[in-house]
Image (cartoon, grey):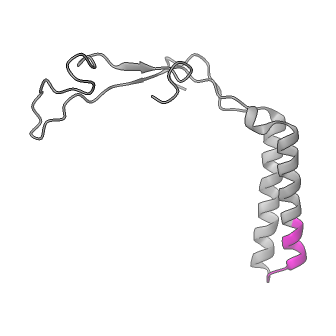
Amino acid sequence: MSEGSSGGSHAGRPSSWIAVGIIFVGFVVGGVALCLGPAWVMLWAGVGIVVAGLLISWMVHLFSDVVVDAPRVIPEIVDYSLFGSRSAKRRGGEQGEVIDVPISTDTQQTPHG
């Protein structure tokens, strides 16, 4: 993580990782089955394991693992001229962005940028 971060984590809950691990094992079993012949019984066993992992991920609410990140600071590009010289044309017109100050975005306040 970066130094200015507020302690956000991409780790997820252990139950979510168990569900992902089960799905991964199902894909490995199915992949090995395809390489061995294909071994259809083993392939369908892998599909069953993947489906079981998907059901477990639904039961443990896998997609509710929220990643909390610090607000991002994105430097805006203000120079749109063809030859690289600074011009008065900026995104948003004359009252638009400030040239030397980056714009801080907060996805809770402005989710689309």
Magenta: main secondary structure: helix
Q: Is residue 66 magenta?
A: no
Above-or-below relation of 53 to 48: above
Residue stretch in magenta: 37-45
Above-or-below relation of 86 to 40: above
Residue at the (65%, 32%) spot, across then down: 10
Residue 36 placement (x, y as % from top left): 79, 80
Residue at the (79%, 83%) spot, across then down: 37
Residue at the (24%, 16%) spot, across then down: 95
Residue 42 placement (x, y as % from top left): 88, 72
Direction from residue 36 to residue 75 in the image, left or right: left
Q: Which quarter of the rendered picture does the C terminus lie within?
A: top left
Name the image quarter holding residue 46.
bottom right
Name the image quarter holding residue 33.
bottom right
Above-or-below relation of 111 to 58: above
Q: Is residue 39 magenta?
A: yes
